[in-house]
Image (cartoon, rainbow, N blue to C red):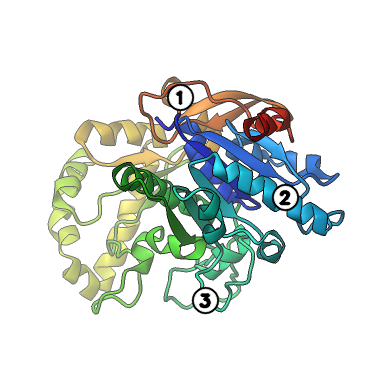
Amino acid sequence: MLSEFRVIELSDYPAGSILGMHLADQGADVIKVESNPNNREIVKQNLEASVWNRGKKSFALPHPGTSYANQADNTEFKSTLLKLISISQIFIENIDTKFGDAIEISYEMAKTVNPEIIYIKLTSFPENHPYRHLPSKEELISSASGIYAMNGSGQTPVKGEGPSFHEIPYSSGMAGITAAPAVAAAIFQKSITGKGQLISMSIHDAMFQGMGSQLVRHHQRQNGNQESHPVIKRFYQCKDYRWININIGGMKRFLEPFLQLVHKIEWLDQLSNLQFLNENKDVKIHLEKEFEKLWIEKTAVEWENALDQIGVPGTMCRSVNEWMESDQAIQSETVIQVNDHFFGEMKQPGRIIRTNHHSKINPAPKLGEHNELIEGLFNG
């Protein structure tokens, strides 16, 4: 779908790499400009980098700010970068703030060599933010935007519990997903006006659309947490000690068929009356215990199948391996096999968006693998 577009990616962080991956997955010719320190292979051992850099071409240059780079290197780096921009349609910038002055690259400079360039600048925090000088590191932005909070937004933390860190790059991933349609919109506008533009986006601000009900404030609610049913929980442990997630709540269209299934239809009136349950704690506690006992009667998969038969939303909580190795994931190419240069055969997530573009996804390139080819583009 994007096979006519050449993208130059200058990114030191996941957000820019993820955006480049999305564009490459849709057929864009993405050239990743990479630094060339002696320890580059250490970076290549990063599993995520093998996914985020797949389908791209690697062009290695001495990076301003590295220990061996001098002013001559900086001048050559910028000169080469501008040559690449002059023969491309899209430029992604997501660089370490401390290298920005050394490179001296900007939209104003880029459009002098290519007035039609679509220039997307990803930063950690917005221009007016007190932390705007910080690098686009996932852990910094996630910490600042509430991703690691153990408790719901607005709630007092549980004594003795601290932040819950995890490996999922929510902030960078959300930034890449947000930036991709912005690039598509700029391409569409350019097709009408013939003009490029600057797209500025902070990874921190991208999280404001990624937090869902955590960010909702209402005069009848003390915080942004989704209000749950006083009795019915989201998760229950089953006969085989596996867990199931259900979405019944107080919705009669789900609650009534479920109570008929478990032969407890006499609970319907009480469970449907939230005010009654909140005002009668003894009844509430009794129903909580009785409702919990129901799930011990079947395994999680048996419950999943039973709920499916009556049209009630519910699913067994699966592990990542179970999810990735399911028949549906393989047959739909939601999970694909890639022969990575460093790791060998590995599973990766497939294309998030599927169009008529069905070319094979190539593995992440070796460092500098395409230097000769790319130099030929502007030296030929």
For the point 29% across and 61% down, which residue is it? 231
Q: Identify which amino acid the numbered label 2 is placed on.
A: Phe
Q: Earlier in the sequence, mark 1 or mark 2?
A: 2
Whether residue 221 sits left or right of residue 82 in the image: it is: left
Residue 340's image quarter?
top right
For the point 24% across and 79% down, which residue is it? 219
- Mark whose residue sits in front, 2 or 3: 2
Residue 107: % across, % down = 52, 58
Determine whether the residue tagged by mark 3 lies in a helix, strand or loop: loop
Quarter of the image with the N terminus in it: top left
The residue under label 3 is: 129
Residue 31: % across, % down = 60, 37
Who is closer to the viewer here, 54 or 331? 54
The residue under label 2 is: 77
Q: Which mark is residue 333?
A: 1
Determine whether the residue tagged by mark 1 lies in a helix, strand or loop: loop
- Mark whose residue sits in front, 1 or 2: 2
For the point 52% across and 66% down, which residue is it? 150
**CB-based contact (under 8 Å), mark 1 and mark 2:** no
Q: Identify which amino acid the numbered label 1 is placed on.
A: Glu
Q: Identify which amino acid the numbered label 3 is placed on.
A: His
Whether 360 is drawn above or below 129: the answer is above
Whether residue 302 sits left or right of residue 157 in the image: it is: left
For the point 52% across and 40% down, which residue is it? 88
Residue 229: % across, % down = 27, 61
Q: Earlier in the sequence, mark 3 or mark 1?
A: 3
Whether residue 226 sits left or right of residue 319 in the image: it is: left
